[in-house]
Amino acid sequence: MSAVRTPTRRRPAAKATVQSAAAPSPFPPIAEYAFLSNCHTGALVAPDGAIDWLCVPCFDAPSVFGSVLDREAGFFRFAPYGINHPSMRAYEPGTNVLQTTWHTPSGWVIVRDALTMGPRAREDEITPHTRPPADEDADHVLVRTVECLEGEVEVELVCEPAFDYGRAAAHWNVTDGDRHTADAAGAGLTLRLSSDLALGVEGGRIRGRHVLAAGERAYCALSWAEHLETPDGVDEATARIDATARFWRSWLGRARIPDHRFREPVQRSALAIKGLTYMPTGATVAALTTSLPETPGGERNWDYRYTWMRDTTFTLQALHYLNLQWEADEFMQFVADLERNEDGSLQIMYGIDGRRDLAESTLDELSGYVGARPVRIGNGAFDQRQNDVYGAVLDSILLHTRRSNRLPRSLWPVVQTQAACATEVWRNPDQGIWEARGAPQHYVSSKLMCWVALDRASKVAAIRGDSELQATWAATAGEIKKDILEHGLREDGVLRQHYDTDALDASTLLAALFGFLPAADERLHASVLAVAEELTEDGFVLRYRTEETDDGLSGEEGTFLICSFWLVSALAIIGEAQRARDLMERLLRIASPLGLYAEEFDVKTGRHLGNFPQAFSHLALIQAAGRIIVDERLAEIT
């Protein structure tokens, strides 16, 4: 007789949960990183004192420290031994020099970190210039100093490069008999580490430790300079950091920043944008990093270490608002030099050296930030057709021409080709401003930016004295506007995402920012308020609702900071001054502890998401602050 089986009780299937941005993780929150720059490359410094991201010699080179994307992909720590949480971190005022104060059971120390800059001594062979070199330039050295303020503190140095995005281990060689200099080689690159701490090799890492008493100092420096030069002792290391601080303060001193309650966030945004500028060519990277996720644990991970044409107009607006005319001219000359497509159009993005091929691949060896995969290098959207690019470029040229009272000969051909391309393509569907990887659509913002292209081209033609082209381009601009108002409005008069949907899209806020409709127009007013009331989470703006948009990807995403700052500007434009100020104050309160912004903000957890720091977020902050400041100043005299 067979045994009677007891029926197995089945548990109900577990409900899939969305990963939280605040889930416990060995990775620091994105917003807790500090940003260093020498205008050739940048670094992220974790709260525990480790460099978790650094690409050398330039922003888009392979990383040598990549722990922000995989905890085994390399780091460089210089901090008290056994202590991971500092007492205070702050930028030295007016600079991108980081100062970290540490309190240990036995004493206090201060660490200073900088990618150093100093007087230009010779032609730069590491990252050659195509623009006129400035008086100061990058040393191609990361310098770190520590000073004991009180008591005694044991300081630890751990340097573990992992070359080529973590794919090549470092091979160390101590190069002097006193154990104070060592070279690390891998993937065709050599770095030199020097320190007044005695160094010891432990496989692919090098370590040093020393007890500092009150008043004592120490340093370490990592060099990829032409002859691997490093500071000769702690005094020179301190002098290099001091020179770097003077560079940043001198540069910021040339900016025009109003005496206003928004002064500090505008200054920090200006320093972030300058820090994301590649000095040899004048290009600006969209962000320092690649593949920091827009969705926790998701696939919305992109490489932002390139320059987007749509950023041009916002970059120029910010630079001219701050009276930074040299940087504005450098950026416009970079645009003028870019190689065009066969039809004369510009790509939507380029490498910081102007290269066109940004073929995308994945680094399957890396875990990704908190498990967000794939990790991408390159950007597969580089050859997409996005019809907004023409308006961004031509608005920039008009703005720059008006500010300089001249139209450089190199820019008029750009005006002609971009106006011709916009005329040719404005009726066609495209991938839209957000680079959707779904089917092409008749996006309203793309049509809008084609209108901007022809409207601005007409105005540039007027400045040049070409009345025939002025009339032709103005007529086409009128035709585009008519088409948008006929097909791009919902029944309630609100601008829609594209012609075949009633879904909203934050990019329609550009209608206010670019003067598509008068500020008092009921349709503009309704469109801005619809975004504010229907496309927000806790008051912060989404690009679009992912369930309503075929973007070719799965998962949700956070609110977009640039869109929230755009809403501030748009509210100010349509006369909703108090709502604009209220949202601006909320946005300023969610800045990182060091005043920086990523691409997105997760309202559920209060965490930043996406690549960091994000130039577009800071550009939009400056624009929004400028709108409010101008309105308040005008109110004072009326």
Image (cartoon, rainbow, N blue to C red):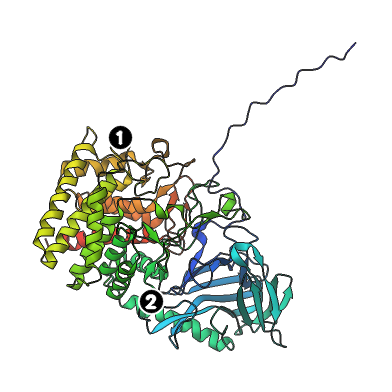
| Residue nearest the viewer, comparing 485 with 297 | 485
Work out which residue is located at the far top of the displayed protein and give it.
1
Closer to viewer: mark 2 or mark 1: 2
Residue type, label 2: Thr
Q: Kindly identify the residue that appears in the image at 15 percent across and 54 percent down.
A: 473
Above or below, comparing residue 322 to residue 479 in the picture: below
Residue 526: name its quadrant. Answer: top left
Query: Is 556 positioned to the left or the right of 408 in the image?
Result: right
Amino acid type assigned to the residue bearing label 1 in the image: Asp
Under tag 1, what secondary structure? loop
- Visible residue check, residue 99: yes
Q: Circle 1 sits on which residue? A: 500
Residue farthest right in this picture: 1
Q: In which quarter of the image is residue 613?
A: bottom left
Q: Residue 5 carries which label?
A: none
Q: Residue at image x 66%, y 72%?
A: 158
42 or 132: nearer the viewer: 132
Instruction: For marks 2 and 1, give the CA distance.
Output: 45 Å
Residue pointed to by mark 2: 130
Looking at the figure, which quarter contains the C terminus? bottom left
Instruction: Name the spot of residue 616 as percent of width and height, x first.
Output: 37, 59
Regarding residue 577, the answer to whether it shows in the image is no
- Secondary structure, mark 2, is loop
